Every structure is written in structure tokens, then in C-alpha cells.
Image (cartoon, helix red, strand yellow):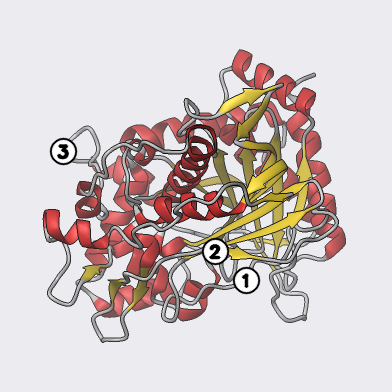
Amino acid sequence: MLSSGQEMDVSVPCSGANEVQKRLGVFDDEGCLPLTPFERYLVRDSALAASLVIRVAMNFRGECHRELLTKAYRIAASRQPMFHATLTKASDVKWQVSECCLDLIWKEQIASAEGLADAVVTEIDLNKEPGLRTTVTPHDQGLFVTLDVQHACCDGQGARQLLAEWWGIYDQLVRQGDYQLKELQIEPLLERGVYRRPERSSVGFWEGLWNLFLTVRGRTVRLAAQGVAHTHRRPLERVLSVSQTASLREALKEQGFSINDLGVAASFVAYEDVFQKRGRGTRLTVVNPVDLRYPSDLKVAACNRVGLAYLRRAWKRSRDLKVVLKEVRGILEYVKRKYVGAEFLHGLAGLENNPKLYDWVIRNKFFTPTLQFTCLGDTTRAMRYRFQQTDGAVQVGMLFLDRISGIAPLAPGVPLSISACETSDRLSLTFHADGGFISVEEQSQFATRFMNLLMSVCD
């Protein structure tokens, strides 16, 4: 539902890149930023780079002021230089930050938002367009918003920053006619490729082997292709009710686990339960992005730092969820304490000095897991002090957030990606499957088994 409201000035600066250059001079003479080792790893294979799109889908109820929503988006997007960047075509690929204004894509109004949440995620080619695309589709009850970000220019935290500032600014404009923001912090752009080191200056031989075991594939269980073209099928979404979400959170709090711990453990158990007759290999491998840095949503611009945990369990080991959950918790605590994901990224940087070895590692897909679980967290938490709550629902202006869904990328060779996304009172899960490995029936079976495992901790 749209409202034009009173006439007001909605013009805003298009980009924060000029401010970056004036204050720190972090750009080179051509106005470019260098890629970090992880960014180069992501964009090295053009097919991989085009497919790594993170989607956040939001459904709102209520009335919207279109001009103010557009203005708020432009302001928030202008403070994230990485979202304005495309890849240069030179042999030494860099980020070229554009001064062009990023704008909302408004679709025609539809009768209902039903079915939009699982729409196909389209690719973003960083050689031709910036890595941020945001679409608004009005419907009879409110708005449906999709925010797509290319993973090579955003680690997920940047998307959370953008959403928090966008809706925080919009709420202030509607209620007060003006807005206030924290000062733009540019320094994080200088540290995009800097990762914290382990607590100790050196790692022992056996501990080094253990870290290698955590970050290199080994004999990972793989699913054989089903003889059809690999396709990124529409994700399957399952949403817990308000009461189910509350019960799950309370049970996890009592037992000392997080949603991320439970999601990884359930991934192990459900995968073996559903695919035990088709698996080939000796160990299941789940890759789990973990937060190995200080929260970047306390700063502004997108830092694009990332941590990865590769967790393994022997195929046909105990499938008791409680046993698996304790193992997963122990490994993740170790990974975060020792910054194992950061060691993986330091290793990527070192490999760049040996191009032949680097190509061999990528060609042999040593970091291709059995599946991926991503916990996108609560996308409203970063600026929660600005968001009002009405009957448990987040309110911005006269819009009420019904729910948020998150869809993690599905990289080539990975048959299944599961993601969890929270709002103030609901948890949603999406199951993204590659049709070349997993049938529609198997995708549904896995989702059902996974959800049953989640709720079993409440018993």
C-alpha cells in the first residue's frame, strides 16, 4: 500500500566514494581499490563469481511513503562504497567504485506476496554491474522487498548494515521529517584483508595438522550427479511460528547452544538420514561461515571480512542429535578461539605467491564441502534501538515487518545450502538445492527431517 504524502526534497548525494578519497586516499590514481585474497578467490572462476548472490527477502504490512523510502535507501547505500563497485577488466583486477546513484527497482503492484519469497535468485555479473540490487513489489497488504548482494563485495555484515540504516532512516523521516546518523567511518576499508591472528604467535605441529583437517576437504562424502543439467532450483522455505520460535530459543538458552550450533548439527544428521544410500566418501563436511572478527555492524562501510569453519564427522557415525550437537559446539568454540578461518584466508594469500599451486588447489576443489549451513542472524539487531516494537512486530513508519527470509549462495559442486534468518519473533529456514544432484522429493524430505530435528530439542 503506497502513499505519496506531502511534497518534500528527496535528493541525496549518490555515493560516499568522494568522501573516502578526500579523507584517506585509499583509492589509487584510477579511483580503484585492491581485491583481498578471499575476493580474488571468489572471482577467479567467472561461473562461481556470478552465482554467489545472497538474498534477503522482507515482507511488510501497512502503508508506505514511496518517495521517503527511496530517499532513505539512497542515503544508506551511499555510505557503502563496496556496493557501488564493479570489477575492472585489466589483468590486475581491481574494484572500480562508481559515483552513480544506486536506486530502488519498483515493480508493479500485485494482489498478494504469496510465492515471492522463493523466487529464483538471479545472477549479478560484477564485470557489468554493482553487487547490490534491491527490488520493491507493492501488494494489497504492504510491500515485498528483495535485497540481493554479490558475496564477492559483501560478507553479509554489510547487507545487515544497509538494511538497518535504510529502515532506521526511513522511520526517522516518516516520524520526524529528518534523520540522524553516526559519522561515516572509512577506516574499515583499509582493513578489509586484515585478519586477526591466533592468541599465540605460533601453532604447534599437531595443532597445525588439526587446523588443516578443519579447512581442507579430504575424502568428503559426495552425491553423484543425476544425469540432468545442474540448475539452481527455487529455494524451499519453512517458517516457524511465533510460539515455536520462542520455545526453540528458550530450549537452546537452557542447554547452552545457539541456533548456529543446532543448524550445523541438524545438517549432519538430516543429510545422512536422507542420502545415506547415495553418499560416496568417508566423511561428511559442513562449511559454516562464522564471525571471526569484531562486529562490522558497529562501523560503516562494508568490511568484507569472513571466517569459515569446515566441520567433519565420519560417515555412519552416531546420529544422535544431542551427541552431534556437543561435538559441533566444541569444534566451533575451538575455531573461534584459534581463528582457524583466518588461517585459511592467510593460506589463500600465501598461495597467491605460487600461481601453479594456487590453480591446482582451485582446480581440485579442495574446499568444496558436502553441504553448507549459514546462520544469517537477526537482520534487525544492528539498529534495534531505532526500531519500535508493536505487538512483537518491528515497526518502521507505518509498516510492520511480517518476516525476513535469507537465502545463502549455492556454489558450484555443492548440492545443498541451508540458511537460517531471524527477526524479533520468528525464525525462517531456506533449503537451496542443485537440481543436478538432488530431486524435488529429496529436497522436501531433507527440509522435513531438518525441521523435525530442530524442534526435537524442545521435547
Residue shown at the point (37%, 51%) measured from the top left: 212
Q: Which of marks 1 and 3 is nearer the N terminus?
A: 1
Q: Which of marks 2 and 3 is nearer the N terminus?
A: 2
SS of the residue under disc 1:
loop
Mark on residue 201? 3
| In the displayed structure image, the side of residue 54 where residue 300 appears, left or right | left
Give x and y (percent) for residue 450.
Answer: 76, 42
Mark on residue 53? 2
Residue shown at the point (62%, 24%) measured from the top left: 389
Residue beneath label 1, please? 122
- Quarter where residue 38 is shown: bottom left
Q: Which of marks 2 and 1 is nearer the N terminus?
A: 2
Is disc 2 in contact with disc 1, using a CB cutoff of under 8 Å?
yes
SS of the residue under disc 3:
loop
Q: Which residue lies furthest to the front in this view?
A: 7
Please state, as top left, top right, bottom left or bottom right, where the C terminus lies in the image: top right
Give x and y (percent) for residue 271.
Answer: 72, 50
The residues tagged by marks 2 and 1 sit, at their Cα atoms, a distance apart of 8 Å
Give x and y (percent) for residue 357.
Answer: 30, 75
The residues tagged by marks 1 and 3 sit, at their Cα atoms, a distance apart of 44 Å
Amino acid identity at mark 2: Val
